[in-house]
Image (tube, rainbow, N blue to C red):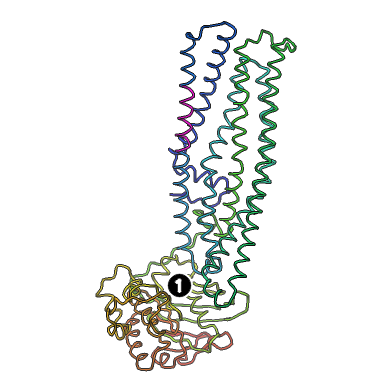
Amino acid sequence: MIDKPKNVAPGRWLNRLAAADRRLLAVSLGLPLLSGALVLAQAFVLAGVLGAAIVEHVELQALWGSIGLIGLLIALRVGLAVFGEVAAVRLSEAIKLDLRRTMFADLMAARTAETSSRSSGALASTVIEQVEALDGYFVRYLPAMLQAAILPLAFAIAVFPIDWVVGLLFLFTAPLIPVFMALAGWGAEAASRRQASALNRLGGHFADRLRGLTTLQLFGEAERETERVRVASEELRVRTMRVMRIAFLSSAVLEFFAALGVAGVALYVGLTFLDLVTLRGTELTLAAGMFCLLMAPEVYNPLRLLAAHYHDRAAALAAVAEMDSRLERLPGVAPAVAPAPARPAEACAAARLELRDVSAATPDGHPVLSGIDLAVAPGRHIAILGESGRGKSTLLEAIAGLRPFGGAIALDGVPLAAVPESGLRSYVAVLGQRPHIFAGSIADNIRLGRREADDAAVRQAAHLARVADFADRLPAGLATRIGEDGLGLSGGELQRVALARLYLRDPGLLLLDEPTAHLDSRTEAAVLDGLIAFARGRTMVVVTHSLAVAARMDGAFCILGGRLSVLDEPGLANGKAGIA
């Protein structure tokens, strides 16, 4: 699994990901280095063959052994390169798979209030596209970086005993390439960061428009949105070409300096053979000169390879920055302050609910609630009434941790922010005004409350929620298939299916928003009987317009002017509403 450091820079974070599988990392980095070491042997043998054939006039038959050795060295280098790249690809795929799993788990564990304001399309693009952008870093950049750090220096040291002048040329000219590579890399990284941001915006824009395609068509906006997607795609194309232009320009500059270095060595060797330069104490043999010439491009080749793949590093860092921006922290990196663990609640233990000076606002900052104080003892049932738009549903969402709020909310004395998301979801059950019903059978939708529930449990929940009253009249009963969003059922029937889904769970706190909406008085009374029976021994908060529902509760409150006041039970203590 991915390490979970408390604080880490993007580059170090990438390297920790690479170190997750040390065996594959060692193979993917070590084999290219071993292949580079064979370059020295290949150049030495080849220079010896040329010197023996040209200067010493050795017969070809006598050189077949050395020529065969050269072929073997070339085959070994090819094999090492192939196996090294395969290991790097496997390492990269393992890292990306583990990273996507971690990101998905983090998103699923995040509170809804934290993710509701983010574009789902942008989040999907982050998980898919930005993770994929890390591939080049692990497959190409890391091996190239290690080769560039070790091989040029090793080659220069190996050349020194042959010719110290060529060795000095290598040592002085090779560092110029990383310097210019860094200068060009800054521009490439900035352009890659802008491209990654544009790609995420385009992905989010496209996904959101695709989801609302039917609405766009109904309002005649499909053509206009198509044009906007085309403009966004053109913007991404332009940004991509800018990144490619910087990459090609930097490669051209670096190729130029590498060519100058090779030309300098060739010029020195040629002038030495012509006796126009006499910096050596001894004569430069043809074999020694050929060895220097053969090693000249090999000294610069790791640096040129690093330059060619430096944009992979820039793209990866841009992707990491985009992940950090979209997810608010790097995947697998723990928050600075870990929340305190909540008290483990027993199954079906009624919760104690406390609200102190709670306030909430709309996304644009318009205040909805202010100064809400409420205390509900374990096992008590309360109703909250008020006109539409007064903040009843907002208050319920704040208690469930589904939207940001001010003040303090506590469950059993534990602040809501300190309750782990998994514990909160198992301890608190929420039924909104518009529960989502999926395409499938009625029984399948009820079973979403508890996947492992058997048919008897589903039937009992359906009976308690009065789903069986209408389902039994259908040809297939609870096995009757319904469409997406409950197509084929009325609003009241949808609400009862969602209520039955809730009855398969075992929460300590029930938060219900208009649970009897769209029901006639007789059906409402029957559904309330089942609800009260299920809620016995549990704490329940019901938001409703129905006085009949409020009359069945232990107490009722009303929201007026963003504040909560007692409507039924006068449980006031120090100006605070409470049900003891």
Query: Could you say where residue 277 lies in the image, as x and y percent from the top left?
Result: 74, 13
Q: Is residue 463 in view?
A: no
Q: At 47% across and 91% down in the image, what residue appears?
A: 570
Q: Quadrant of the C terminus?
A: bottom left
Q: Residue 162 versus residue 82: which sits nearer the camera?
A: 82
Q: Is residue 522 in view?
A: yes
Task: Give neighbour class at mark 1: few <14, some 14-19, many 20+ (Cα, 10 Å).
Answer: few
| Tally of marks | 1
| Furthest residue in direction left, as rendered | 456
Residue identifier under label 1:
413
Relative to 312, is 74 above or below?
A: above
Query: Could you say where residue 452 lies in the image, as x and y percent from the top left?
Result: 29, 67
Q: Residue 459 versus residue 337: which sits nearer the camera?
A: 459
Quadrant of residue 463 in the image? bottom left
Q: Residue 577 versus residue 115: which sits nearer the camera?
A: 115
Q: At 55% across and 43% down in the image, what residue appears?
A: 137
| Furthest residue in direction right, as rendered | 276
Secondary element at image label 1:
loop
The magenta span reads 72-86
Relative to 173, is 202 above or below?
A: below
Relative to 129, is 508 above or below?
A: below
- Does the stretch in magenta take in 511? no
Please name the amino acid that badge 1 sits on.
Answer: Gly
Query: Could you say where residue 57 lies in the image, as x and y percent from the top left?
Result: 56, 6
Q: Is residue 269 left or right of residue 570?
A: right
Q: Is residue 468 left or right of residue 224?
A: left
Query: Could you say where residue 299 lies in the image, as x and y percent from the top left?
Result: 61, 26
